[in-house]
Amino acid sequence: MLRFTLHYGIHFIVPLLVAFLFFKEQRLKVGLILLAGILLDLDHFLATPIFDADRCSINFHPLHTYWAMGIYCLMLFWRTTRIWGIAFLIHMVADLADCLFIRSNL
């Protein structure tokens, strides 16, 4: 239950907190974009099986690779892509937390 709460808390609560705390003027728009970071999970449809509770997404799915994360970090440097970069990096943190739980056998 802790793993589920942490993983989905990062996916859904953290983006809203970031929008509320750091983007007060546009918190609704930014919040929706940050929540849309979950769209990175569309690459799970390329895997067989699509969902495996014991599989670490990091460096397994194409949009979860270290190369992709490098691009998400680069997105932070341009105003037009910054919010999406933050959204995708929050997504990676959620999936990394999930991977750490898998590896710790908790």
Image (cartoon, rainbow, N blue to C red):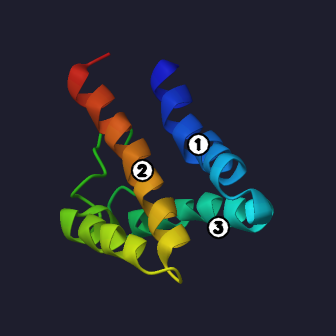
Q: Is residue 70 above or below residue 31?
A: below
Residue 88 numbered tag:
none
User: Badge 3: how crowded within 10 Å, few (<14), some, or many (20+)?
Assistant: some
Residue at mark 3: 33
Residue 36, given in percent of the width and then of the height, sits at 61, 65
Would you identify the image quadrant in which residue 35 lies?
bottom right
Residue at mark 2: 51
Please tell me which residue lies in front, 66 or 101.
Answer: 66
Residue 54, given in percent of the width and then of the height, sits at 31, 36
For badge 2, the amino acid type reads: Phe
Please tell me which residue lies in front, 58 or 89.
Answer: 89
Mark 2 vs 1, N-terminal side: 1
Task: Looking at this view, name the residue that lies furthest to the top.
Answer: 106
User: Badge 2: how crowded within 10 Å, few (<14), some, or many (20+)?
Assistant: few
Q: Is residue 73 left or right of residue 21?
A: left
Mark 3 vs 1, N-terminal side: 1
Q: Residue at x 54, y 63 (%)?
A: 37
Would you identify the image quadrant in which residue 64 lies?
bottom left
The number of numbered discs placed on residues in the rendered structure image is 3
Residue 14 numbered tag:
1
Q: Residue at x 28, y 70 (%)?
A: 68
Task: State the SS at label 1.
Answer: helix
Residue 89, given in percent of the width and then of the height, sits at 41, 57
For badge 1, the amino acid type reads: Val
Q: Residue at x 78, y 63 (%)?
A: 25
Residue 44, given in percent of the width and then of the height, sits at 40, 62
Task: State the SS at label 3.
Answer: helix
Q: CA distance from mark 2 to mark 1?
A: 23 Å
Q: CA distance from mark 3 to mark 1?
A: 13 Å
Would you identify the image quadrant in which residue 66 lies?
bottom left
Q: Residue at x 39, y 38 (%)?
A: 53
